[in-house]
């Protein structure tokens, strides 16, 4: 039995608000990602896009709104977030349940042609470096020549002093925009777990979490990501937007 539209709408709206605590200028970052994808796919009537770590479909829905002719494949391994996305943003994407970086994860995508663009926001920093490099290599193989990987995430500088400064700027921006008035990540998950409609999904979620080692946040700098992307086969890598340590990094396949 699926989740009702009313329940999906409630939890997706709350998700959107709590995410503003963590992603500095989140809407602008989404807009910049859309700008890049729109530019790269301007000559394609039916571009193929992939959203890595899609959550409940936040970025996929925004891209679908900007590029109504695009086919979007949205990938995640969290059954709660995937079901919320499938219900609330049903027309935005084809949702695929697979764990990025696991053996054979790209086989689950069932792509019928090369990707024009792969996008991600605040998802890839959970991957250990060896897994991240392997993921970048898989993405380079899936993209057409001239295709792009567009990653919006937090890329702290390698030095502690500079990292403190970029974090400060982001924190002050969030304070001015009152983003910290929203509920936090833990509160969202705690409250969602009490919703009877989501109970079965949370059972599946906990089963998966117990079978996998706990994820951690790997604080790699943008230059380190660029180095790994070039090793993986991307010919050009650049940051196109930054506020504090929040950046949009674009890698182009040669």
Image (cartoon, helix red, strand yellow):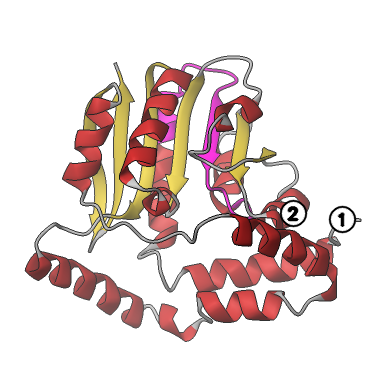
Residue 138 sits inside the magenta stretch: no
Residue furthest toward the right? 1
Horizontal side, residue 102 vs residue 203: left or right:
left
Q: With respect to residue 194, does 231 lie above or below?
A: above
Residue depicted at 58% across the width and 14% down the height? 113
Label 2 belongs to which residue?
83
Question: Disc 2 on helix, strand or loop?
Answer: helix
Residue furthest toward the bottom? 181
Contact (Cβ within 8 Å) of mark 1 with mark 2? yes
User: Residue 1 at x, y = what percent?
Assistant: 91, 56
Q: Name the one closer to the observer, 108 or 195.
A: 108
User: Residue 191 at x, y = what percent?
Assistant: 68, 80
Asked which quadrant contains residue 156, the reply is bottom left
State the mark number for residue 2.
Answer: 1
Residue depicted at 62% across the width and 56% down the height? 211
User: Residue 31 at x, y = what percent?
Assistant: 43, 48
Q: With respect to residue 77, does 252 lie above or below?
A: above
Q: Which region shows up in magenta?
A: 36-57
């Amino acid at each position: 039995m699926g989740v009702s539209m009313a329940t999906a709408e409630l939890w997706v709206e709350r998700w959107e608000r709590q995410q503003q605590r963590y992603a500095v200028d989140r809407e602008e970052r989404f807009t910049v990602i859309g700008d890049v994808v729109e530019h790269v796919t301007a000559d394609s009537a039916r571009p193929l896009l992939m959203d890595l770590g899609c959550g409940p479909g936040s970025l996929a829905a925004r891209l679908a709104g900007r590029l109504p002719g695009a086919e979007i494949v949205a990938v995640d391994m969290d059954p709660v977030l995937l079901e919320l996305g499938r219900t609330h943003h049903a027309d935005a994407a084809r949702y695929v349940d697979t764990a990025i970086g696991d053996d054979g994860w790209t086989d689950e995508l069932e792509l019928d042609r090369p990707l024009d663009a792969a996008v991600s926001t605040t998802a890839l920093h959970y991957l250990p470096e060896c897994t991240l490099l392997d993921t970048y290599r898989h993405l380079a193989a899936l993209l057409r020549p001239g295709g792009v990987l567009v990653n919006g995430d937090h890329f702290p500088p390698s030095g502690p002093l500079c990292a403190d400064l970029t974090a400060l700027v982001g924190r002050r921006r969030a304070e001015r925009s009152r983003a910290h008035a929203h509920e936090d990540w833990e509160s969202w998950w705690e409250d969602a777990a009490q919703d009877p409609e989501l109970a079965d999904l949370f059972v599946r979620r906990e089963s998966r979490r117990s079978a996998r080692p706990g994820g951690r946040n790997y604080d790699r700098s943008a230059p380190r990501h660029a180095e790994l992307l070039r090793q993986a086969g991307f010919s050009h890598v650049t940051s196109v937007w930054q506020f504090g340590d929040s950046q949009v990094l674009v890698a182009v396949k040669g």
